Amino acid sequence: MSTPALIRLTIVTLIGFAVLVWLGVWQLHRLEWKEAIIARIEARTERKPVALERAIELAGKWRDPSYLPVTVEGRFHNERERFLYAISLDGEAGWHVITPLETASGRVVLVDRGFVPEAFREPHTRDEGQFKDVVTVTGLLRTSEKPNLFSPDDNEEANQWFTRDLGGMARSMFPGGTVNVVPFFLEQVETDIPGGWPKGGQTHLQLPNRHLQYALTWFGLAGCLLVVYGAFVWTNRRGKPS
């Protein structure tokens, strides 16, 4: 190999090595970020549930109030259910039932009551779980979401939602817009529902955390790149006539 070609190869190798190392370091930063989120979730879910007014206060102060346990009392508007596409903790495709709950003070909370398979989507198939009296619900606070590039479009007419869009759901439930909807969802934690549906306690608390594996992979590739480069140069120089 000529000297100019070797210089070009060395430059390309160094650039590739730098990129691979940077990706490894980036994954280590992601690991730190993910571990902080997991620690926050664990700490919050172990807290004693707070009342709705306190949750509203904290939601206005905290940057991300997700997973705060909240207890609220009120009456469900079962006729205004909305259905959010979801995969259950058991891996089954179906829907989360989002139902507005109105408190005695007139506040409305959108409660994710839990998962139902397609066979139990229609309310008449799970009448036992359609509470008509005042109930007390404990749930984990969840914030609204925005659709990403891969999210299907919500179909309001068919009542098929693919993004946890608080504003959109609230407007579809109460077209007049005169109700006082709190600025977050509650994912119900209770699982003992008459008739078994909806099935609560569907919050994904175990977040995937493979960033250390990814970092080691990038660092390993960086090392392999240097080994291949060194072996190629050594073999090339060895084959040259003295």
Image (cartoon, helix red, strand yellow):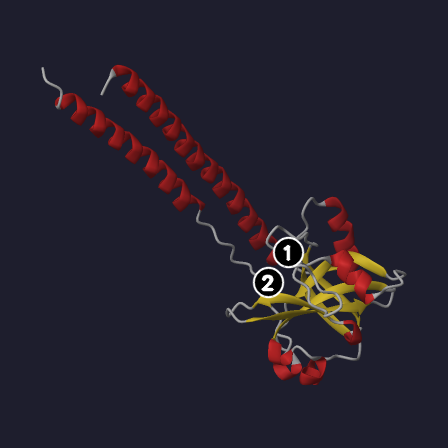
Image quarter of residue 105: bottom right
Identify residue type, mark 1.
Tyr
Q: Earlier in the sequence, mark 1 or mark 2?
A: 1
| Disc 1 from disc 2: Cα separation | 9 Å
Q: Is residue 191 left or right of residue 175?
A: left
Provide residue 20's location: percent of width, then percent of height: 40, 34
Nearer to the camera, 234 or 72: 234
The residue identified by callout 2 is: 203
> In front of the other: label 1 or label 2?
2
Q: Is residue 56 above or below residue 124?
A: above
Identify residue type, mark 2.
Thr
Helix, strand, or loop for circle 1?
Answer: loop
Provide residue 34's location: percent of width, then percent of height: 52, 46
Residue ID at (74%, 50%): 59
Q: Is residue 234 above or below residue 92?
A: above
On the rendered image, what quadrant is the C terminus found in?
Answer: top left
Q: Disc 1 vs disc 2: Cβ atoms closer than 8 Å?
A: yes
Q: In the orientation shown, which residue stands out farthest toward the left? A: 242
Crowding at dot 1, Cα within 10 Å, few <14 / some 14-19 / many 20+, comes out as many
Nearer to the camera, 150 or 70: 150
Q: Is residue 125 left or right of residue 204?
A: right
Helix, strand, or loop for circle 2?
Answer: loop
On the rendered image, what quadrant is the N terminus found in?
Answer: top left
The residue identified by callout 1 is: 67
Residue ID at (71%, 64%): 155
Image quarter of residue 84: bottom right
